[in-house]
Amino acid sequence: MIIHPVKSIQGEINVPGDKSISHRAIMLGALSKGITNIKGFLMGEDCLSTIRCFRDMGIDIEVNDSLVTVNGRGLHGLKKPENELYVGNSGTTLRLMSGILAPQDFDCIITGDDSIKSRPMKRIIDPLTKMGANIVSIESNDKAPLKIIGSKLHNITHNSLVASAQVKSCIILASLYTENDTKIIEPVLSRNHTEIMLNYFGGNITTQGSTITSTPVKELYAKDINIPGDISSAAFFMVACLITKNSQLIIKNVGINPTRDGIITVLKAMNGDISLLNEREINGELVADIKVKSSKLTGTVIDKDIIPALIDEIPVIAVAACFAEGKTIIKDAQELKVKESNRIETMVTELSKMGADIIGTDDGMIISHSPNLRGATVRSYNDHRVAMSLAIAGLVAEGKTDINESECIDISFPGFYNSLQNISDL
């Protein structure tokens, strides 16, 4: 992908459907009785991997543009797949589906691409094993591929060391097959799309502080779902507008779930001109239009409790920080090391090539005001969020920015480049 500098960002834009919600809509639709119609589904590679896995387990799923119809078979309707379940690059698919597979009456192997095989799975293996699951890391390294031997599960109380929606959701989905309440205690409440959608489908999930209680129900029942735009995708355009002179943009129909809106909080703390219009609720999720104007940003400190609400947006926040007066410090973000790439290392390496004053730390980054970025040949490391963050930097860098391995963007944002063209003179 080649990016040239632009004069301004103007207009209105829609971003693809929320990735997290898209995954969960397929999973819960498959486990529910009846037909679930999903509008606004993200047709990215990760979410298509989830569809493929459930088709392999006997679920009839029809796809027509961004409308997906899931013919659910209930909590006990999945069938043994004929081959290994392949999740591609999707950690969400692997971790959440492991919770669904553990209590089934069949055995299977679940695996993914080389990136997935390098990511830690002990964080789900341990709590599922406590529940009675039989999970074997085939390479004996606590990573995929995993062999999951269906077993009868029991409830647990799990104290999570990290605030991880994937770990929490894995346990919640497994708890649908237990007889008593399961409790999950997080250090900080992570994104809660699973809890919201399960209750929407007839589940019984309650939250008090950062303690989540899952009470089993006999059945889930199909519901139609409208998926809002993904705030993680909107974040790239928010930053693009803020750092580009004479710019104004409205991003339509974006999910602003309080466990996900840390990007808005941080950009406002950096003096970003951001406002929410037409706030509303759709199938339990808060949604709004986001209005952004170019702004003179200032540095800030990003740490502690807000990190889980913006962990996926930190790469593009690092780009914004280059244009902020003073210094921006990001810490308590060790989770960045185990994403699609080590995002601390990759963002420091690649933004440095463009002239950024950025230093990596053990748990984050320190970025000083360095607005005179220059175009360079950079790498994505096959990490979609890194690729898109570097593209945003390229919009305001002097000269040409050439992003290698940019095809990975299709994982979460097919049509990203076209969207950039529609609101600029790119």
Image (cartoon, grey):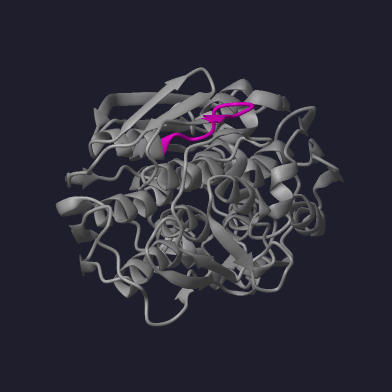
Residue found 36% across the figure and 49% down from its top: 24
The reply to whether residue 40 is in sight is no
Number of on-image labels: 0
Nearest to the observer: residue 82 or residue 152: 152
- Magenta run includes residue 211: no
Residue 45 quadrant: bottom left
| Magenta extent | 184-193
Left-right relation of 222 to 11 = left
User: Which x, y percent locates residue 87?
Assistant: 48, 69
Nearest to the observer: residue 273 or residue 290: 290
Decide: is 393 above or below 48.
above
Decide: is 95 above or below 358.
below
User: Which x, y percent locates residue 295?
Assistant: 57, 29
User: Which x, y percent locates residue 114?
Assistant: 64, 74
Nearest to the observer: residue 237 or residue 382: 382
List the single residue furthest toward the bottom: 82
Left-right relation of 19 to 198 = right
List the single residue furthest toward the top: 209
User: Which x, y percent locates residue 96?
Assistant: 47, 53
Residue 239 quadrant: top right
Decide: is 376 above or below 354.
below
Q: Main secondary structure of the magenta part?
A: loop
Residue found 31% across the figure and 42% down from its top: 228
Left-right relation of 226 to 90 = left
The reply to whether residue 171 is in sight is yes
Q: Quadrant of the N terminus?
A: bottom right
